[in-house]
Amino acid sequence: MSGERDWVDILSALLVPTVAVIGSCIAFLQWRTNELKRKQDLFDRRYAYYQQVRKIYFAVASSERPTDETDFFDLAEEASFLFGDDVAKHIVSIADRKIPEQVRHGIMDDWFVQPFKKYLELK
């Protein structure tokens, strides 16, 4: 009888730490899921913004509409929140840059894409 009681005491003592470990694992997995969702949501917003700026860049390149610096300053202000100051400065510089001929034919140049690359990678 005594041996049986010892096993019950041992299992009872292990129950609380086991529940704590399982609870910690669930909390960690939930945190990781939320972190991945946050990163995906941020990527989606940044990519939509990139597509918007790209569309304006092509429109300016093909002379569908004249360059309006206020558009670029508004875009740059939003970029400073979504990306950083490097992308905001890059967007403002679009208004002053002579757009290469290849862009006029719908081929994106590395100069435009480069500042966005580090922000548009899923990690």
Image (cartoon, rainbow, N blue to C red):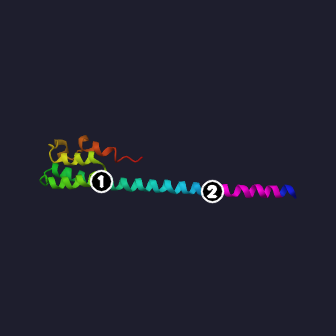
Q: Earlier in the sequence, mark 2 or mark 1?
A: 2
Taking the spot 86% from the left edge, 57% from the top edge, the residue there is: 2
The answer to which of 64 and 33 lies nearer the viewer is 33
Q: Quadrant of residue 74?
A: bottom left
Q: Quadrant of residue 103?
A: top left
Q: Is residue 26 left or right of residue 59?
A: right
Q: Is residue 7 magenta?
A: yes
**Distance between mark 2 and mark 1 Cα atoms:** 40 Å
Q: Where are the magenta residues, as a range?
A: 5-22
**Residue 41 in picture, x, y percent from top left:** 38, 56
The quadrant the N terminus occupies is: bottom right
Q: Categorize mark 2 by other alpha carbons within 10 Å: few (<14), some (14-19), many (20+).
A: few
Q: Which mark is residue 81?
A: 1
Q: Give, as a three-letter code, the residue at label 2.
A: Ala
Secondary element at image label 2: helix
Taking the spot 34% from the left edge, 48% from the top edge, the residue there is: 120
Query: Which residue corresponds to mark 2?
Result: 20
